[in-house]
Image (tube, grey):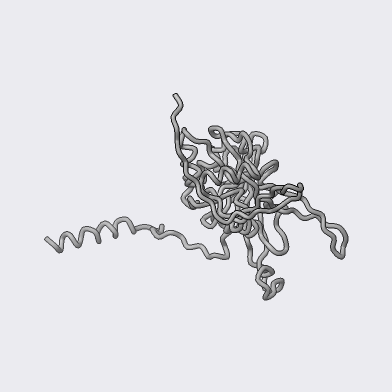
Amino acid sequence: MKKVITFIPLLIFLCISTGCESIMPQKIEINELFISSTIAVDKSDENVLVTVSSKKVKPKETSDNEGFQNFMAQSANSQGATIFDAVRKLQSLSRRRMFHGHVEYILIGEEAAKGDILKYLDFFERDHEMRLNNVVVIVKGGRAEDVIYKAHTNEEFVSDRLNSLFNNKDSMSISDKVDLVDLMGMFDNKQMAAYIPCISLVKESKEDLEGEMEEYNILLNGFAVFKGDKLVGYATDTTARGANWIRGKVKSGIIVVKDNDGEKISLEIIDSGVDVIPKFNK
């Protein structure tokens, strides 16, 4: 009886492994992948515009031994009737296989957020390559694609600059990270309004040997606030810090007050605590 039981799994394996097509997944070399680190979503008329950013290793003849110089920024975009349609068209336009398993940030443009943001987030939640700990960010007063195209510098990639912002968020305590999985939980909770960290692009002029040049800085300031699935406004500066204080998320920060002579004094927050006492009224 034991010999028969051992033989049955072997027979099943032989039956399904016949033919020319391999049952093993196809291997793809890493240099044949377009490994996206940041994805931007914007509204474009009746379509959805998806822009992806990636780091690409420079050819040996153009690279040196100084870290950043060994890599170069690479981006691509595509439009579609839905976000899934746009992402699939991205693949058809690329010579390399798109891989989104290392995406860190999902940027949503303001116009897209004013509509039904859930139709965009639903794709990222369901896609098998996406991680649920991706950080979702709203681009205040602008388009998400502009962050990818304009915020890249000679020292940092877009994803690196966003990492720096969120790593130092506790120094002012006016914003916070919100992962995709936590955000979807907010939208499922009918008793609360969803909030998402927001960034804005600020143009700065600098001079070098060739004359004046434009650079863009990224500012992290507060939250985008939603009613249902639509963006309705922003909580910034002290309002955003107050929201963090209620949530017990304030670590540090500076509060500027005036003394008896009208002079400004900076007070540093070194600790915080909160007790929430609910009360029912009627």
* Residue 52 percent coordinates (x, y): 62, 52
Q: Residue furthest top?
A: 282
- Is residue 16 shown to the viewer in this render? yes
Quarter of the image for residue 120 reads top right
- Depth check, front residue: 132 or 241: 241
- Residue 209 left/right relative to 66: right
Q: Quadrant of the C terminus?
A: top left
- Is residue 41 shown to the viewer in this render? no
* Residue 266 percent coordinates (x, y): 69, 53
Q: Please report the residue visible at 67 percent of the width from the left and 68 percent of the height from the top.
A: 68
* Residue 154 percent coordinates (x, y): 73, 63
- Residue 180 left/right relative to 217: left
- Residue 170 left/right relative to 18: right
Q: Is residue 254 positioned above or below 156 on the image?
A: above
Q: Residue furthest left?
A: 1
Q: Is residue 111 positioned above or below 211 on the image?
A: above
- Depth check, front residue: 242 or 84: 242
- Depth check, front residue: 205 or 53: 205
